[in-house]
Amino acid sequence: MRRFSAERRRLIARGGCAITKVGPVAASGGTSMTDEEKIKKWVETWKRAGPALERIKNQELREWKYDPAVIDALIEAGLCSTAPRPMTGLVEQQRLFRKLRR
């Protein structure tokens, strides 16, 4: 299982990510938040967190090491978790196109 980088964990712990709890009571004043206030808080949170998360993602992608065993395991998991389809749907699509043409 993949683990978060230290910087991402710090960001989440500080509440700079959308993984924070947004309840019916504002964190600062103890008064009820209106829907509009909740939406504004959500937008402000993502304005702060978005660039930081993008930076973290880019850093993690640059530092990622290719491991054939991991890729093979992911492919195997995908193949084992789905049943093969009896057909691709191309025949059904052609039937619908013929119907539309008439």
Image: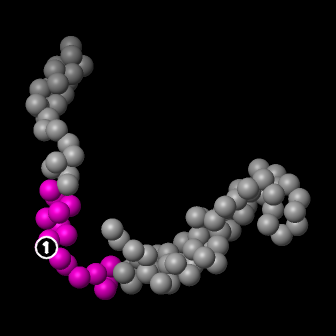
Left or right: 28, with 101 as reference point: right
Q: Residue at x 39, y 84 (%)?
A: 59
Along the viewing direction, whichever of 59 and 70 lies nearer the viewer: 70
Q: Amino acid at mark 1?
A: Pro
Question: Magenta residues, as a range?
Answer: 61-76
Q: Position of residue 88 (x, y in %)?
A: 13, 35
**Relative to 41, residue 86 above or below:** above
Q: Is residue 63 magenta?
A: yes
Colouring style = one colour
Q: Position of residue 32 (x, y in %)?
A: 86, 54
Q: Dot 1 corresponds to which residue?
A: 68
Q: Residue at x 31, y 84 (%)?
A: 62
Location of residue 65 by image quarter: bottom left
Along the viewing direction, whichever of 23 and 49 lies nearer the viewer: 23
Q: Position of residue 69 (x, y in %)?
A: 14, 71
| Quarter the C terminus occupies | top left
| Quarter the N terminus occupies | bottom left
**Relative to 14, residue 29 above or below:** above
* Residue at the outermost top position: 102
Q: Position of residue 75 (x, y in %)?
A: 16, 58
